[in-house]
Amino acid sequence: MTSDPIRDRVLGRAFEGVCAEMGSAMINTATSAVFVEGRDFSCALLDAGCELVATANYDPSHLSAMALTAEYALMELGREELREGDVIIVNDPYRGGGHLPDIALIRPVFVDASLLGFAMNRGHHIDVGGMAVAGFPGTARSMFQEGIRIPPVKWFEGGAEKRSVLDLILLNVRFPRAQLGDFRAQLASCMTAEQRLRELAARHGADALRAAMTATKARSEALMRAAIASVGDGDYRFSNLADDDGLGNGPYLVNVEVRVRGDAAEIDFAGTSGQAEGPINSSYGNTIGSCFNAFLHALGGEIPFNHGCFRPLTFHVPRGSFLNPVAPAPAFGGVTEISITIIDAVTGALAQAVPDRVAAGSYGTCINVAGGGIDPASGEPFGFYFFQEGGWGATSWRDGWTSVPNPTSNFNDYPAEVLEADLPLRVVEVALNDGSAGAGRFRGGHGTVRTYEVLCDELEVSALGERFITRPFGLAGGDHGAGNRLLLRQAGSEVWEELPSKFANRVLRRGDRFSMRTGGGGGFGPAAERDASAVAADAAAGLGVAPVGGDAPPEPVPPAPVIAEPAIVARVRPQMANACPSCPLAAPTSCPFHHPFALDFWDAYWLEVWAARNCPIVRR
Amino acid sequence: MIVGVDMGGTFTDVVAFEDGGGVRTAKAPTTADGVSGLLAALRQVTEPGNVASLVFGSTVATNALAQRRLARVGLLATAGFRDLLDIRRLWRPRLFGHDWERPAALVPRHLRLEARGRLDPRGAEVEPLSAADVGAAAAAFAAAGVEAVAVAFLHAYASDRHELEAAAILRAALPGIPVVCSADVNPERREYERTSTTVIAAGLMPIVSAALGTMAARLRDEGLRRPFRVMKSNGGVMGIDAARARPVELVKSGPAGGVSACLHLATLLGEPDLITLDIGGTTADVSVIVDGAAARGSHDSVEWDIPVRVPVIEIRSIGAGGGSIVWLDAAGTLQVGPRSAGADPGPASYGRGGTEPTITDCAVVAGWIDPAGFLGGRMPLDAALAARALEPIAAHLGLAVPAAAAAALHVATCEMAALVRELTVERGLDPRRFALVAFGGGGPLFLGPLLDELGLDRGFVPGSAATLSALGGAFADVVVDEVRTESDPSRLGEGLAALAARARAGVAAEGLEATVVRTAADVRYAGQWHEIEMEAGIDEVFAAVAARFEDEHGRRYGHRRPEAAVELVALRARAVATMAKPRLPALAAGAAGPPARVRDLHLHGVGRVRADVYDRGRLGAGARIAGPAVIEEADATLIVPFGLVGVVGVAGEIAVTRDI
C-alpha cells in the first residue's frame, strides 16, 4: 500500500467519527443515568494488533485501560479463537481494566474474512453485585466484596448469542432490567462501528484502512513527542497524599519522578506506598491511564488519544504498591479517586518544568455516594450513584474553574427535577460552597454543596470519597483549597454529623438528610498579590476563600517490599531464547512473556493458567 | 411588494418580489442600528411605501447576548437553588487542557435571591410559598435597580401556582418592571435550562422591546405602511408584539432565514429530506430538513453551558469557510480551520497582507474560482499570492502547489461530511436518504465534492445562492410552537388539546388563523434518557402512540424492548398560518450552448482536468451540463465534478445528479 498522507488524514478523521457514532448509539438507547447524563463510558477502535487507533472519550478514566483490556482479552482467549460475529465481555481490573462496574464489550471486525480490528466500548454499570447497592463499598477488604469479576467471555460466538453468559452476569447484579438495556446499548454501539468500518473498507479498501490506522497512531506519536520535547530535559519529582483506605490505614503516598529526555519520558513511582487493605488501589491500567491524562492536560489537549501516545512514555510502577496491587486487593476507588491523586502528582512534577501550562490541585474526588432501597411509590427496588463537581486549581493566568467535573471525569449533573421524579429523595439544596476556594493571586474555583432528604423508610448508602484530610495544593505560593465533606443530619435532629470519606452499608431513614460538599481548587501565587477588583467581586458575591494552614499529615504508609517474580516467569524465561523463535505466539500482543509490561501486572495464577494452556515451554 | 431582508455581519441583503412577478435584489453595508442599512438597501429597489410585507432576520437579541448587553436582571429562585446559574450542567467542552475560560454567570450572585416554598414533580405543594421572602426579594430588587425580574421555581413545569403568586407580589412592588415566569417561558423539566432561558428572556425583554420599537418608528417615519415581521429561531415569523413578548425566540433569527428558504425549496422541488449547507467567510453551517420540517435542536447555547431552551432549528458549524486557514500541525498533518483570516487581512489572494493560505486561496489555486471574476469582477484576486502562501505546505506534502490546494479542499469537504454525518446519525437517520442544498458564497463550490464524499445521489444550488437567507423571510410562515413536560399518559389528549389551543391563540394574536395544527409527543422506553418525537393526535390513546414508537425505535436503533414500558415525556403543538408565497419567476427554456471558456480544475484524487466554464446567467431552463464543468455567477461558483451532471430548473435552481 503506497503512502497517501491525505487519505490517511481523512480516514483518521473518519475513525474518530466512527467512535462518535458509537457514542451516539449508546446515548440514544441506554437506560442508566450513569451512561447518559454521567457519560461514564468510552468508545474506541483498535487495529488488528489490538492497538488503540481512535477513541471517543466521554470519560477520561477509561483511557488506556481500554487498550490494555483488549490486549489482555486477546492473549487470554487466543487470537486464533476469534470468529466473525463474536462479542467479548470483560471487566476484571486485574486484566487491564479499572474497576468492576466498568464493563467492556469487544467486537472483532472482519472484512472479507480477514480481521481488520476491534470495536470496543466500556460503560459504568449501575451495579455489579458485591456488598453495596450500586457499588462503592468504601470498606471492602477484597475485590470479591466489590462484585462479580468477569474474565474475557464470549456473549456472542460466531454471531450466535450465548444467553447463558449474559444470564450469569445479570443474575449477579441488582438491576438486571435496566442493565440489560445498557448491555443492548453497548452492543448497538459495537454493531454501528462494524457497519461503518465495512462501509469505509468497501469504499477505500481494507488495506487503505490498515495503512491509515498505522498513520493515525504515528501522528499522535509525533504530536506526543513534540509535546514532551517542549518540556525540556530534567528529573521532576512530586508527591501527593491520598487520605486513607476506609479501614483506618493511611495516608497513602504517591511518589513520582518524571524523567524527561528529549522527546520521551519515564515515569517512575518508586517510593509509593504499599497496596491498601481497603478499596483505593489503582490497577496498573488505571495508573498509567492517569499519567496520560496528566500529560494531555498539561501539554497536549488536542492530541488524538491512541496507541501512538503510549510509545514515548515508559512506566515503572512497583508491583505491590497501591498503584499496581496484587489480586484480589479491592480497587473500586482507584478509578474514581486515586486516578486524581496520580494526575495531580504528575501535574505537580510537570509544574516544575512548565508552570505556565498547569493548574494547582483540584478538589480531587468523585465523592461517590451510592445507595438504594425500595421505592414506596412503585414497590420496586431502586439504586443510584452520585458523583459531584467541585473547584479546580488556579493557573498562572486565571482563577480556577468553579463547579466543574474533576480531571478524571466529565459528566452532566443529575437535574433535581429529574432526580426527584426518579428516586424517593428530595433535593434540598444545590449551591456554591462558600469558603472552599484556595486563596492566591488567582484563587481556586469554588466547590459545591448538594443536600438530599430521604423520602423512603430505609435507604442503604455507601460512600467512596477522597481529599477530606489532605487538601488540594496551591502552586507558586498559592494556598490550599478546602477539603471535601460528607454530612448527615438525622430526622428530628438539628445536628450535622461529619461522615468519613469511605463507608459502606449505612442505613438512613425517612427524613434524614445527607449533604455532599466538595472543596475548591488550590490558588496560584501569593494571595496578597490578588487584584483589588477581583477581591471586591468575590466580596460582592459573598464567597470567601478557604482557611489557610492545617495540621501536618501523619507519616504515610511505607512502600511495599519488592515482590518476588512469579515462579512461572522464573521457569519460562531461561528457555525463551531457544523455544520462542519457532513459537507462533511469540509476539508482544500474543504472549504475556513477550509483552512489554504484561508481567508487571498479570496475576501469577492466571499467568500459570495461560502458560499451561498456551506456552510450548510449559506444555512440553 | 414582498421584501425579505438578511442582515449579515458585513452586508444587508434585500430581495424584493414585485407584484408583476419580477425579483430584485440589493445590498448595502450593515449599520450598527440595522435599520439605516436596511433602508439604504431597500431604497435601491423601491420606496418603503410600496412594501406590502417586510420580513427580516433580526440580530438584536443575538448581538445583545453575544456582547452580554442584557438588562439588569434579578432572579428569584426556590430556596437553596439560586446558584444554579453558576453550577450549570457541568460538562466541560474539552476533556483536556486548561485553555478554556468558563463564562461568567448571567446574573451576579447578589442579584440572585431565594424564596421558600416547594412543589413536587407532579405540581403538588410540599411547602407553601413564603410571601415574606418574595416581598423581601422585591425590596432588594428595587434597591438594586433591576430592570427585569425572572422567577424560576423548581417543578414550575408541573404547576405555575407558586410562580404566579410570586409574580403578583413582585409586579405590585415593582411597577413598570417586567416579571417573567419560567412556567410561561419554558414549561419543561430540568431546572437549569428553564432558569437560564427565563433569565435570558427577562434580560432581553427591555432591550428587544426598545430596539424593535425604535426600528418600527423609524420605518414608519420613512413611509413603511405595514408592520414588519421578524424571523423566529424555529424558522417561522412573528410580528413585533410577539417578538417583544417572547424575545428569546429571536436568538437564531438571522440564520433561520436560510433554512426557511430551504424549507420552501423542499416543497418546490418535492424533496422533503434535505441537508442544507451554507458556507460563508468563516464557517460552514449545516442543518437538516426531515419530512419537510427543519430538525429541531433541544436548545440553543448562548455560550458554553448557558442554554436558551426554545424551539430552534438546529444549525451546526465548523470552521471551514472561505477565510478558514489551511495549516500543518506539529505532526505535519494538513488541517483546515477553525482559525480564520477574517475579512482583514483576509485570504492571501486578497492582497491585503495575509500570508497564511485559506480555503479561498486553495480554490483560486486549484482553479475552482476564477480570480478575475471574484464578486463579479469587482474584487479581482491575486492567484500568485495564493500560490506563494501554499508553497510551504505543498513542499511538506511533496505535492505540486495546485495538488496541495486540491488536497486541502478535499480535507475541508471531509470535515463537512463528518458534520453532516454527526447531525444525521445522532438522530438515527441515514444521510444517504437526503438531498443536499448548498448556498452562501462558498456552498456551491463544495456541493459536488460533498455529494461524492457522502454518497448522495443529488444536490441543488438554489436560484440565488448568495442571497438565499434574505429570500427566506419572504417565504416563511407564521409558526407558533408550544411544548410542555407531561409524564401522565392519561392526560395525553387533554394536554395536547390545551397546548394546541395555546398555539392557535399565538397565531390569532398575529391577526391570522392557523391553517395547520400539528400535535406530537416525546416518547421513550422507561429508563431511557433520549426521546423520539412521535406525531400524536388529540383523539388518540397513548397505547397507539406507544406502538408507533416501538416501530420507530426498531427502525432507528435496530431493536425493540419487549420487557420495557413506554413512557410519555413531553407534549408538543405547532400552529401554522401559511402565508401567501411570492412566485419565483419562471426561467425561460434554453440549451446550455457552448461553454463561455475553459479552464483547468484540480480535483483531489483525479488530478488536473480541463473543464468547460459556463455563465449561469446565460443558461436557460433545461440546460444540461456534464462534469467536469464550472458554472459561474457573480457571487458563487458551482463545481460539477466527473460523473455528475448539472441541470437548470425552471425556478433557476441547478440540480446536480449522478450522470447515468
Image (cartoon, rainbow, N blue to C red):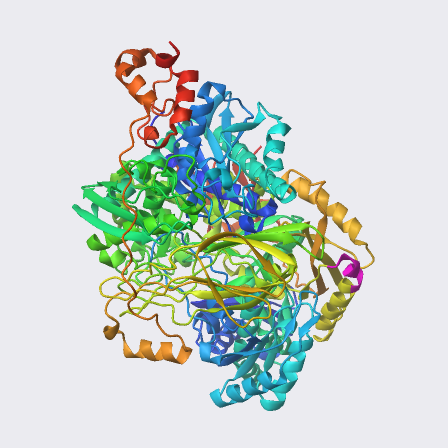
Q: Is residue B373 left or right of residue B125?
A: left
> In the rendered structure, does residue B493 fall within the stretch colored magenta?
yes
Residue for point 56% across, 44% down: A127
Vertical relation: A484 (above or below) A2: below
- Image spot of residue B376 (x, y percent): 42, 57
- Image spot of residue A434 (x, y percent): 41, 72
Front one among A413 and B28: A413
Q: In this view, does A67 lie to the left or right of B460?
A: left
Residue numbers of the magenta segment: B488-494
Residue for point 59% across, 25% down: A159
Residue A375, picture quadrant: bottom right
For the C terminus of chain A, give its image quadrant. top left
Magenta: main secondary structure equals helix
- Image spot of residue A579 (x, y percent): 31, 12
Residue A290, picture quadrant: top left
Extreme residue in the right direction:
B539
Extreme residue in the left direction:
A234
- Image spot of residue B570 (x, y percent): 68, 59
Residue B633 visible, this angle? no
Residue B202, picture quadrant: bottom right
